[in-house]
Amino acid sequence: MGRETKHMYINLPVKHVKESRAFFEQLGFDFEEQFSNDQAACLVMDDTITVMLLSVKHFQSISEKQVVDARQSSEVIISMRVESREEVDELVEQAMAAGGSPFKEKQDHEFMYGWSFQDLDGHLWEVFYMNDERSSLS
């Protein structure tokens, strides 16, 4: 059973958002201003992959795990947008059945619904559905 292409949101902790953004701009990457501020820079890789460069403090508030020094170890939170609330539940339930473990409880913020799991290596995966009609951040 095939699945539609998903948009991947990769969250990476960075010590200095401004400097990290400048680095990637020098490499020719664009940023989505709507989702960028002093705590985060939204790096657009292509139309299906976005990398959020998050301050260590902001990353820590999301992960609830100790942030590792990526020069010594590596860790990311991989967020995947799916087409429905039901698909969120289905994918996380499948992950648990395959040997994954729970991470966070379901999160329901009306316009956004999500649930999280850890894969076999402890990497964090957040699966979410966003109602585009109600997702305006302005």
Image: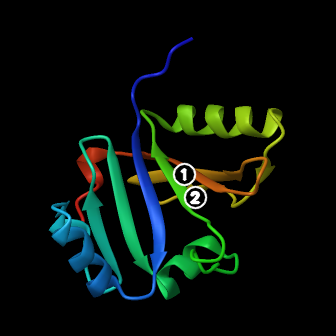
Residue at label 1?
114
Q: Secondary structure at mark 2?
A: strand
Upstream in the sequence, badge 1 or badge 2?
Answer: 2
Q: Position of residue 39 (x, y in %)?
A: 35, 84
In the image, is residue 44 above or below residue 130? below
Residue at label 2?
107
Q: Position of residue 76 (x, y in %)?
A: 56, 63
Q: Amino acid at mark 2?
A: Gln
**Which quarter of the image is occupied by the N terminus?**
top right
- Picture quadrant where residue 72 is located: bottom right
Q: Position of residue 13 (x, y in %)?
A: 49, 76
Residue 57 visible within the image: yes
Q: Among all residues in the image, which is located at the extreme top?
A: 1
Which residue is depicted at the point 64% across and 53% down?
116
**Which quarter of the image is occupied by the C terminus?**
bottom left
Which residue is depicted at the point 19% across and 60% down?
29
The answer for how far apart the CA atoms under marks 1 and 2 are is 5 Å
Q: Position of residue 61 (x, y in %)?
A: 56, 80
User: In screen coordinates, is 90 left or right of 6?
Assistant: right
Q: Do the residues under discs 1 and 2 have CB atoms within 8 angstroms?
A: yes
User: In screen coordinates, is 104 left or right of 7?
Assistant: right
Which residue is depicted at the point 38% across and 53% down?
111
Q: Nearer the viewer, residue 42 or 35?
A: 42
